[in-house]
């Protein structure tokens, strides 16, 4: 049997030095990879914070959902614009084209601080997905809660030519699974946006002299002249400004129907079909489509028209869900919706289908968390 003796002297020292050098090199490479990953992730994130003031809330102290939506869009626009301008070429601005379902998990109150964190989670050639979370902090007690979460889609538009969509720099994914899941979300939202376009030209008739708890009774409209303070550097309306107006109208509809304190519970996909330019007049119309025992679904449509031209077009559409609250902020039953005609019945049936689908999704999410 042959025996091998360990090396000694200079030979052993040389081997040990080589091993140590290789280990140091590998360690440095790992550190670089981790550091680059952290830096890349930091560049894909942005956070803004603001204390909620009395003018942000309703008469009982609940912060308006539109205020939260506006902050969510601002954070998404900043992180998206910053990312797209990290490359050479024309400077651009991230324009909001779609908001996925937005969940209002807990109400926010006057005096609380909203921490809005936006992170880029997927990029295609011409669009990027930004996922946003809103943490509500009570700075007196230190208590924090996840109040809202949403996903938004942006496209970068050149500052030189607003109709020119720029390429989006790719991001670094933590895993292939993360990239694949993002691609599935991208394909799904792209398909739904195409399907939604079929509804964009529907005309909303003005309500007649209506009976209480009917669609016509609570239907409401708001007319707003778009000014410079409403607009981006491209001179078209900020998505957050539009969403705030939509939430206000939906809130009026909900309050008229149940005559109680109401709050935004969730928002289904908000689709931005066409840009709204500075100087346009926007008409925001909300109408009830479905009422369950404790919630109301309100369709909100935004039409835009020029002061000097005859063209009028559908710019934005979405479904808002509100709940009714008592003086202790506990859910109340909602009066049933009185349906009049086949068209209202069709919209109610579609609303019921969305309600059941969202309910099943919430139960599935809850089971996965458990």
Image (tube, helix red, strand yellow):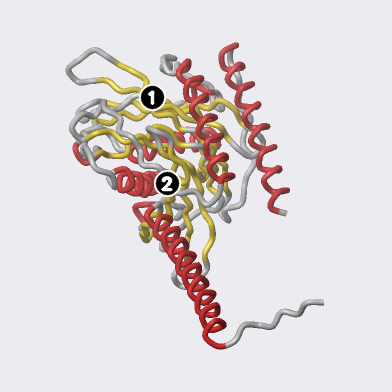
| Residue on which disc 1 sits | 273
Q: Earlier in the sequence, mark 1 or mark 2?
A: 2
Q: 33 left or right of 78?
A: right
Q: Residue at x 65, y 26 (%)?
A: 353
Q: Residue at x 58, y 50 (%)?
A: 326
Front residue of 282/291: it is: 282
Residue 168 lies, in percent from the top left, at: 35, 38
- Tell me the quarter of the image containing the N terminus: bottom right
Residue 180 lies, in percent from the top left, at: 56, 39
Instruction: Identify the secondary structure beneath mark 1.
Output: loop
Instruction: Identify the secondary structure beneath mark 2.
Output: loop
Q: Nearer the viewer, mark 1 or mark 2?
A: 2
Answer above or below: position of 122 versus 226.
below
- Farthest bottom residue in view: 9
Q: 347 left or right of 94?
A: right
| Residue on which disc 2 sits | 171
Front residue of 46/251: it is: 46
Front residue of 9/363: it is: 9
Q: Residue at x 52, y 52 (%)?
A: 174
């Amino acid at each position: 049997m042959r025996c091998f003796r360990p090396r000694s002297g200079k030979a052993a020292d040389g081997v040990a030095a080589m091993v140590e050098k290789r280990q140091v090199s590998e360690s440095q490479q790992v550190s670089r990879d981790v550091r680059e990953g952290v830096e890349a992730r930091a560049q894909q994130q942005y956070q803004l914070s603001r204390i909620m003031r009395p003018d942000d809330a309703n008469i009982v102290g609940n912060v308006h959902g539109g205020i939260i939506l506006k902050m969510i869009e601002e954070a998404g626009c900043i992180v998206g614009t910053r990312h797209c301008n990290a490359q050479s070429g024309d400077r651009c601005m991230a324009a909001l084209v779609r908001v996925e379902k937005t969940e209002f998990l807990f109400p926010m109150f006057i005096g609380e601080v909203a921490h809005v964190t936006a992170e880029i989670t997927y990029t295609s050639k011409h669009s990027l997905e930004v996922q946003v979370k809103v943490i509500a902090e009570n700075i007196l007690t230190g208590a924090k809660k996840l109040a809202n979460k949403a996903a938004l889609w942006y496209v970068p538009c050149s500052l030189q030519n607003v109709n020119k969509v720029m390429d989006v720099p790719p991001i670094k994914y933590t895993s292939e699974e993360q990239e694949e899941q993002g691609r599935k979300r991208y394909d799904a939202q792209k398909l739904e946006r195409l399907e939604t376009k079929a509804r964009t030209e529907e005309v909303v008739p003005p309500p007649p002299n209506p009976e209480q708890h009917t669609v016509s009774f609570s239907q409401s409209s708001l007319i707003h002249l778009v000014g410079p303070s409403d607009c981006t550097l491209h001179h078209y309306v900020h998505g957050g400004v539009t969403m705030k107006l939509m939430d206000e109208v939906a809130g009026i509809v909900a309050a008229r129907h149940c005559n109680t304190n109401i709050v935004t519970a969730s928002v289904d996909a908000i689709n931005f079909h066409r840009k709204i330019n500075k100087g346009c007049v926007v008409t925001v119309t909300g109408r009830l489509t479905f009422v369950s025992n404790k919630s109301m679904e309100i369709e909100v449509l935004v039409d835009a028209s020029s002061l000097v031209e005859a063209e009028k077009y559908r710019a934005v559409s979405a479904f808002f869900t509100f709940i009714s609250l008592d003086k202790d902020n506990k859910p109340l039953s909602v009066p049933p919706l009185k349906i009049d005609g086949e068209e209202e019945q069709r919209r109610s049936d579609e609303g019921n289908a969305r309600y059941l689908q969202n309910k099943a999704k919430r139960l599935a999410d809850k089971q996965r968390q458990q």
